[in-house]
Image (cartoon, helix red, strand yellow):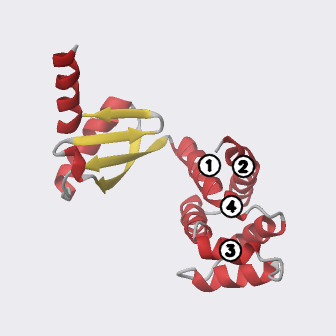
Amino acid sequence: MAELATIARPYAEALFKHCSQSGSDLGATVAWVEELAAIAADPQLRQLADNPKVNAEQVLGVIAGVARSALPDAARNFLRVILENGRLDALPEMAVQFRGLVNRLSGTSDAIVYSAFPMDEAALAELAGTLEKRFGRKLSLSVKIDESLIGGVRVVVGDEVLDTSIKARLEQMKAALTA
């Protein structure tokens, strides 16, 4: 995937630079970039975009029609450039890199919390406070359910992983006993 990251980087940086210079709302831009990325990840849309009988404006029309709300002009222009350059497959990576640039500016990081069970707001807020102290920065948490953990949580922040799940502890005990 290094190739997609290399392709996506200049697009994400150009969008970030444009937003910074024009005073655009970065939160709103992240929202529409991520929505476009989710749409672009659909295999049927990619098949349509790869069809030589379909031009970039037609694909743009389909994507705009599928979007939950009307796309701002900046989104349409960004998408038009991506389609004209044949880079639709790199759009999900562009969204990841753009969000990373926005996070770096605001001093936050995205964190994925894998939990065996759904977490209520109070538990999530308490976990957020503990994790922010542990990682030394503000975190934006998203929770995903992974029943294979049995209990506890597994937290992924960038390339750092904190695994306090029962599954991980059992695997550590197994390794210790068989060593």
Q: Of the two numbered discs 1 and 2 on the same chain, state the one appearing first in sequence.
A: 2
Residue carrying label 1: 97
Q: Quadrant of the N terminus?
A: top right
Residue carrying label 3: 47
Label 4: few (<14), some (14–19) or many (≥20) C-alpha neighbours in 10 Å: many
Residue located at (18% from left, 55% from top): 117
Check disc 2 and report its element: helix, strand or loop: helix
Q: CA distance from mark 1 to mark 2?
A: 8 Å
Residue type pointed to by label 4 = Asp
Residue type pointed to by label 2 = Glu
Check disc 4 and report its element: helix, strand or loop: helix
Residue carrying label 2: 13
Report the front residue among 154 and 133.
154
Camera-near label (1 vs 2) is: 1
Residue located at (55% from left, 82% from top): 69
Q: Is residue 9 visible?
A: yes
Q: Is residue 73 above or below residue 123?
A: below
Residue type pointed to by label 1 = Gln
Q: Is residue 165 visible?
A: no
Marks 1 and 3: in contact by CB < 8 Å?
Answer: no
Residue carrying label 4: 89
